[in-house]
Image: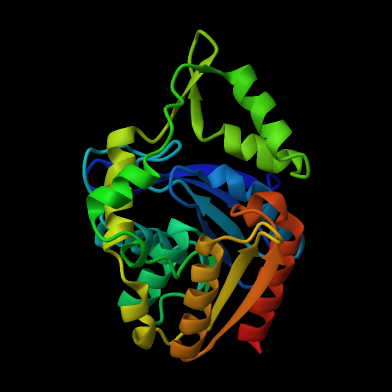
């Protein structure tokens, strides 16, 4: 096979298939990349390219409702999205993948932690990229408070040119792969305006599933090595960041085999620093192999 990258749609449930971008690699540990809420697989393009260059087979997935995957009206609870991922790993196993490192960003980090807790031995290692320790119920006393605070802004109807200009202005240090990956979170309409691939209704269903998730109650079930990569905002520290530091420390203490590394950057570390994140994933995979 000469093409290093393929796209496929993998059936995971009745009338639900996941859009997967897959890079051929060498003989090193395969890596499955899982995006966060309202994101998409393309945010991982830069990381995937560096991982492939290091010899890793790589796959990045659009979770249900996101990107180019199926968009059913239900099934956005944690148990269902984890089952989607389990079936994807099973499919990759038929292609020769064995116990991949599974990395998730933000909500995706919680998803991969839950995958490891409910399906021990399926992954060789688990990575949370500014995710995996999120417990929204610790910050918001009710689902209604959470939904009101984290409701996404109305983006539909924004000209694509305005969105791109805003992204480049607010993220001047991001590589092109991060900018293009973020733009891929949106459908571009014939009139040149955009709309999120993930509708507001489905966004809130995913958010409700995240609000209900308690990863701290799952750590003792995880036997695989865990790497938590936290985003350090630097001087612009906030209550959110201090809570995140405490959550990461608690997770590292509770998990049987875990470590935490902090990287200066944005919540989307994988988009902002793809080479650095890829290097850390490769080092983690090497440690597992030995």
Question: Residue at the spot x=30%, y=59% of the render?
Answer: 211
Front residue of 147/217: it is 147
Q: Position of residue 8 (x, y in %)?
A: 48, 43
Which residue lies at the image location 76% right of the left edge and 58% below the top edge?
Answer: 275
Q: Position of residue 252 (x, y in %)?
A: 51, 84
Q: Nearer the viewer, residue 130 or 281?
A: 130
Q: Is residue 167 left or right of residue 195?
A: right
Left or right of 52: which side holds 124?
left
Q: Is residue 55 left or right of residue 37?
A: right
**Image quarter of residue 270:** bottom right
Point 51% across, 35% down: residue: 185
Spot occupied by residue 231 in the image (x, y as percentages of width and height): 63, 63
Q: Residue at x 31, y 71 (%)?
A: 214
Figure quadrant of the C terminus: bottom right
Q: How many marks?
A: 0
On screen, 265 above or below 3? below
Give above or below for 278 relative to 69.
Answer: below
The reply to whether residue 1 is in sight is no
Query: Does residue 215 sit above or below 80 in this rendering?
Result: below
């Amino acid at each position: 096979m000469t093409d290093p990258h393929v796209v496929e749609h993998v059936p995971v449930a009745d009338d639900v298939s996941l859009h997967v971008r897959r890079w051929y690699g060498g003989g090193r540990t395969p890596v499955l990349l899982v995006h966060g809420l309202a994101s998409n697989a393309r945010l991982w393009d830069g990381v995937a390219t560096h991982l492939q260059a290091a010899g890793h087979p790589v796959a990045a997935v659009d979770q249900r409702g996101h990107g180019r995957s199926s968009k059913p009206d239900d099934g956005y609870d944690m148990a269902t999205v984890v089952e989607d991922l389990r079936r994807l790993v099973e499919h990759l196993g038929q292609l020769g993948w064995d116990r991949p490192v599974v990395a998730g960003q933000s909500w995706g980090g919680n998803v991969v932690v839950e995958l490891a807790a409910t399906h021990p031995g399926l992954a060789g290692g688990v990575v949370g990229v500014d995710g995996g320790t999120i417990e929204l119920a610790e910050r918001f006393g009710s689902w209604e408070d959470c939904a009101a605070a984290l409701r996404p802004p109305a983006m539909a109807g924004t000209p694509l040119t305005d969105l791109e200009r805003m992204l480049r202005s607010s993220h001047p240090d991001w590589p092109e792969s991060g900018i293009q990956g973020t733009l891929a979170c949106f459908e571009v309409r014939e009139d040149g305006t955009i709309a999120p691939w993930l509708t507001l209704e489905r966004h809130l269903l995913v958010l409700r599933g995240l609000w209900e998730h308690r990863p701290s109650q799952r750590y003792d079930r995880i036997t695989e090595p865990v790497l938590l990569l936290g985003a350090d905002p630097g001087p612009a520290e906030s209550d959110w960041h201090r809570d995140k530091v405490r959550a990461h420390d608690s997770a590292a203490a509770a998990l049987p085999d875990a470590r935490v590394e902090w990287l200066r950057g944005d919540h989307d570390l994988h988009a902002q620093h793809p080479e650095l994140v890829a290097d850390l994933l490769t080092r983690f995979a090497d440690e597992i192999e030995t």
